[in-house]
Image: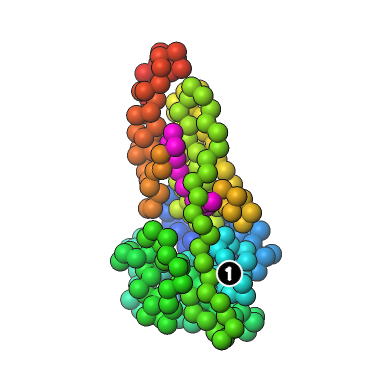
Amino acid sequence: MRVIDLTDEHRGLFSICLEDWSAEAVEAGPGRACWVERYLGRGLRAKLAVDDAGTVGGMIQYLPIEQWPILGEGLYFIPCIWIPGRRQGHGDFRGQGVGQALLAAAEADARERGALGMAAWGVRFPVWMRASWYRKQGYRRADRQGIAVLMWKPFTSTARAPRWLPPGDCLPAPVPGKVNVVVFNAAWCTAGNLTATRAQRAAAAFGSRVAYQEIDTSERAAAVAWGQTDALYVDGKAVRTGPPPSYEKIRQAIARRVRRLPAEAAGGAPAA
C-alpha cells in the first residue's frame, strides 16, 4: 500500500472514518464532517493508506497539540489511527503494517513542519488504540488517566512531555422534576457523534419527562472549562461510551430513572 495526503477526493470518506458502507456512520450524522472542515483550517493533517486498486485501507489524523485539550507545546497530537478490520466495506487491512506506515508518514510530515515531537493516546488494555502498540513504535508514557495513557516521542532534546488536563466532572445544573440526560460531544469522532445521536433520540422518546442537554466540547476552551470532552450522563451517573452504547441501552438507562419520578412529574404515563 502507498500512503497519500488527504485530498478533496477522499475528504467525504475520511469524514466518516472510512465507514461509507455503515448504517451507523450515516446515523452519526454530519458532526464529524463539520469538525473536519473547521479544523483543517487550524492545522489538522491526515494521511491515507491506499492499495493498488485505489481502496483506502487506513487513516491517521494529527494536529498541533495546542488545538487539543492536552497540556503541551510544539508537538503534534494523534487523535486516532484507524485500520478497517471488517469483512464489510473496505475489508480487513490489519496485520499488514498499515498502521506503522501511516505513523511513519505522519511523523515525517510533523518533523518537516517543525514539530518538536509527536503525542498520541492509547488504552492500557489490548483493544483499539493500544498504548503497547505505540510503545513498540518508540513512544513512551508521558501521563496516565484511568485506562487512557498519553504516549509521546520527542524529536529534539528541547521537547517537553505533554500532560493530561486535570480530569473534571462538571455538569450543568439539573432541571428539577425531570430525568436529566447530558451529552458532551467533541464531534471529532464518529463514535462520539453516534452516542450523542442515540441519546437524543432516546431522551425524546420520553417526552417532557426528560430534559436533554448536549454540550459542544469541540472547542478546546469548552473542553477545558467542563473538564471533559466526550461523555454521557443520566441523572448525573456516567454511562460508558466506549464502544458507543446502543440506543436500547441508553433508553433503558433513562427508563429506570423515569420510573422513579413522582407521579405528577411523570404525568402518570408509563415509562417508554
* Residue at x 42%, y 54% (from the top left corner): 22
Q: Is residue 269 above or below residue 212?
A: above
Closer to the camera in the image, 87 or 265: 265
> Label 1's element?
loop
User: As drawn, is 177 to the left or to the right of 34?
Assistant: left
Quadrant of res 263: top left
Which stretch appears magenta? Answer: 227-236
Q: Is residue 148 magenta?
A: no
Residue 154: x and y, percent?
52, 81
User: As drawn, is 36 to the left or to the right of 254?
Assistant: right
Residue that lies at the very extreme toward the right in this rendered image: 41
Q: Is residue 18 above or below residue 98?
A: above
Task: Give neighbour class at mark 1: few <14, some 14-19, many 20+ (Cα, 10 Å).
Answer: many
Instruction: Mark yes or no: residue 118 visible.
Output: yes
Residue that lies at the very extreme toward the bottom in this rendered image: 157
User: As drawn, is 242 to the left or to the right of 7?
Assistant: left
Residue 89: x and y, percent?
40, 61
| Residue denoted by label 1 | 72
Q: Main secondary structure of the magenta part?
A: loop
* Residue at x 40%, y 21% (from the top left corner): 261
Quadrant of res 249: top left
Residue 149: x and y, percent?
42, 66
What amino acid is labelled 1 in the image?
Gly
